[in-house]
Image (cartoon, coloured by chain):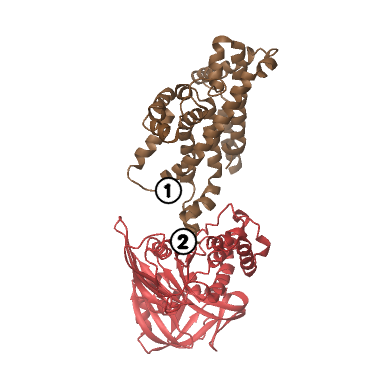
Chain colours: A brown, B red
């Protein structure tokens, strides 16, 4: 007696799923999709495919791409070395003003990158509060150097890593660290041998996000490090410059960045974002 | 063994744990134990059992009192420097390490070279009967296996104080019987102090030499399991440890009590060392030897004491089998029970459970 009722009960949601999507939702959804896909399609359609091999093998492109990859990777390394301990401090310790510290740490997420670049100049520039001391004491100048590119990219990318790792740390059970301590591990050993392996997926995801952000960084880089080919001219800067003189080259460069982005996204989806 | 001992040698545990929290909770428990002794902290959820355990491990700081282990004051010593091993309730085996590396973790932290630590860990696995699971990650282990790995991990640092937080709570009923019996043997072999926390009176009575019942952060009764079962001091304890428990040798459904005692017929059949247990409510008392009773267990006894708990009266009986019986006030009056009165006690076999010891 109960079976027909059950079958009917199962059918209902199926019918509901088949009913048409209301137009007021469907139209904007399709428009939104087109809005996001169309520019990329435009890029592909207008790509001068016959000229492409020539464009991509030009030394300027490789110079910019190489610099971009190296700078983004170095910036990610800086983010890891400084950002993971910072995330641990925010997630695992109590100190006065922690909320304020977190707000300041995440500020570069919402700060216009150009403002970040100006701020970096004022702090680390030759006459900056720290930069002057770096120059006098060590003869180190950061602005308008490749190291400056790394600094600008790390400044913008670090919040992505900190946020990602802190979230993973909060989700990870802190009692594992306690268990390690009862076995004789110091807090640092517990972090290194237990916590770090446990949060490795979060660190990896954060690193990829930070790396992608560093790779695309434009505003802070051009403000703080300038636009010198071979030294501080990264791919986004090269694209912008090429667009004014040689649009075909700009398209080719953009295509390369698009491919790198797609590769990153694919890597993220397969390896971390769908992981349990 | 290799644990640090104070100038007076291993003298066991002497603790007065005071932990005050902001939410008006206050733990104030005295705890002493000789080396080799197993003490169970028994109490309802929220009584402060786990807080006491964390205070002993150094994970929660004491706000008062003292903590002395083998003559050494541990108050203020960080957890990593205490000769204390902990088996956590859900074991907390490190998920990224194999069973072997989980056990080797403690010795490694104490500076034992990697090869030797792994060899020691392999020895522990063998002792726990888990040689085949050395490379298994914790998620591949069954509940009972994980429990044994957690115990081995805690013992591998040669602690002078072993703490077990609800060691059997995460196991299903079937596994629980076996693991309880194994744990009992391992605890019997352990030469230092063991403190276990549980809300299960059976676990406490089977595993511990002495019970400390705590309620609202305070000790309400302390003593040998049988004494507490027969002379509960509060209604809460009467309900909590309402259990007659005996140790003996089982053959089939019959458990012969150790020391030439009487036989108990149980619902479960097994062979070898066993516990037999039944609740005081399962005991029926008669003034004259019953003739038509179908109960398989019949013992003569003498009323040793009467204590009222709510609408129940717990009758403590001495005789060939010391036991506790719960009667209604009316039944007590009808039987005319008074200390010294001779009675016959019957218990149906179906209400007696037998467990491997």
Above or below B168: residue A160:
above
Badge 1 crowding class, 10 Å Cα cut-off, few under 14, some 14 to 19, many 20 or more, is few
Q: Picture coordinates of residue A232 (x, y %)?
A: 53, 24
Residue at mark 1: A92
> What distance separates the C-alpha of mark 1 from that of mark 2?
18 Å
Of residues B235 and A198, the one drawn nearer to the viewer in this rendering:
A198
User: Considering the numbered disc 2 on the image, is that residue within a helix, a strand or a loop?
Assistant: helix
User: Considering the numbered disc 1 on the image, is that residue within a helix, a strand or a loop?
Assistant: helix
State which mark lies toward you, 1 or 2: 2
Pick the quarter of the image with the C terminus of chain B: bottom right
Image point (46%, 37%), residue name: A163
Of residues A188 and B145, the one drawn nearer to the viewer in this rendering:
A188
Chain where mark 1 sits: A
Image point (57%, 28%), residue name: A17
Q: Would residue A117 be seen by someone viewing this image from the given angle? A: yes
Q: Picture coordinates of residue A149 (x, y %)?
A: 50, 27
Above or below B171: residue B185:
below
Residue B74 lies in quadrant: bottom left
Badge 2 crowding class, 10 Å Cα cut-off, few under 14, some 14 to 19, many 20 or more, is many
Residue at mark 2: B80
Q: Picture coordinates of residue A160 (x, y %)?
A: 48, 34
């Amino acid at each position: 007696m109960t079976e027909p009722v059950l079958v009917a009960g199962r059918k209902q949601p199926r019918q509901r799923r088949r009913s048409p999507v209301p137009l007021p939702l469907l139209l904007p959804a399709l428009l939104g999709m087109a809005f996001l896909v169309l520019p990329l399609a435009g890029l592909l359609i207008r790509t001068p495919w016959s000229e492409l091999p020539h464009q991509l093998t030009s030394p300027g492109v490789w110079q910019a791409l190489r610099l971009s990859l190296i700078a983004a990777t170095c910036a990610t390394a800086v983010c890891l070395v400084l950002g993971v301990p910072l995330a641990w401090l925010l997630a695992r310790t109590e100190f006065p003003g922690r909320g304020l510290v977190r707000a300041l740490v995440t500020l570069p997420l919402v700060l216009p990158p150009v403002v970040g670049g100006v701020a970096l100049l004022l702090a680390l520039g030759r006459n900056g509060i720290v930069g002057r001391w770096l120059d006098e004491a060590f003869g180190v100048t950061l602005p308008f150097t490749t190291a400056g590119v790394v600094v600008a990219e790390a400044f913008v990318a670090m919040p992505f890593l900190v946020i990602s790792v802190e979230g993973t740390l909060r989700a990870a059970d802190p009692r594992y660290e306690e268990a390690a301590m009862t076995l004789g591990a110091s807090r640092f050993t517990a972090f290194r041998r237990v916590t770090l392996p446990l949060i490795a997926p979060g660190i990896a995801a954060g690193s990829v996000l930070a790396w992608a952000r560093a790779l695309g960084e434009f505003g802070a880089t051009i403000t703080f490090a300038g636009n010198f080919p071979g030294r501080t001219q990264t791919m986004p800067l090269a694209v912008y410059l090429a667009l004014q003189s040689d649009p075909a080259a700009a398209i080719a460069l953009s295509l390369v960045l698009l491919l790198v982005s797609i590769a990153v996204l694919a890597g993220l989806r397969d390896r971390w974002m769908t992981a349990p | 063994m290799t644990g640090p001992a104070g100038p007076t040698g291993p003298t066991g545990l002497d603790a007065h744990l005071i932990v005050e929290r902001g939410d008006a909770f206050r733990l104030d428990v005295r705890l002493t134990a000789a080396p080799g002794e197993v003490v169970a902290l028994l109490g309802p959820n929220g009584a402060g059992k786990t807080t006491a355990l964390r205070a002993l491990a150094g994970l929660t700081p004491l706000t008062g009192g003292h903590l002395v282990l083998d003559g050494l004051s541990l108050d203020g010593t960080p957890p990593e420097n205490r000769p204390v091993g902990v088996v956590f309730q859900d074991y907390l085996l490190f998920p990224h390490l194999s069973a072997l590396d989980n056990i080797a973790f403690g010795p490694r932290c104490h500076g034992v070279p990697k090869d030797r630590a792994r060899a020691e860990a392999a020895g522990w696995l063998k002792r726990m009967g888990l040689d085949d699971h050395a490379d298994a990650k914790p998620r591949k282990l069954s509940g009972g296996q994980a429990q044994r790995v957690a115990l081995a991990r805690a013992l591998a640092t040669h602690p002078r104080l072993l703490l077990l937080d609800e060691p059997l709570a995460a196991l299903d009923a079937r596994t629980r019987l076996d693991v309880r019996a194994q744990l009992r043997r391992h605890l019997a072999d352990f030469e230092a102090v063991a403190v276990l926390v549980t809300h299960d009176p059976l676990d406490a009575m089977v595993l511990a030499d002495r019970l400390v019942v705590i309620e609202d952060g305070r000790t309400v009764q302390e003593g040998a399991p049988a004494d507490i079962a027969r002379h509960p001091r509060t209604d809460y304890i009467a309900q909590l440890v309402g259990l007659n428990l005996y140790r003996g040798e089982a053959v089939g459904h019959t458990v012969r009590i150790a020391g030439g005692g009487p036989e108990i017929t149980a619902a479960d059949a097994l062979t070898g060392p066993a516990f037999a247990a039944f609740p005081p409510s399962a005991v029926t008392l008669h003034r004259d030897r019953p003739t038509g009773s179908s109960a398989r267990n019949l013992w003569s006894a003498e009323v040793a004491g009467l204590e009222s708990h709510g609408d129940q009266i717990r009758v403590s009986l001495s005789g060939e089998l010391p036991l506790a019986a719960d009667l209604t006030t009316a039944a007590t009056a009808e039987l005319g029970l008074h200390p010294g009165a001779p009675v016959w006690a019957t218990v149906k076999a179906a209400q007696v459970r037998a467990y491997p010891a």
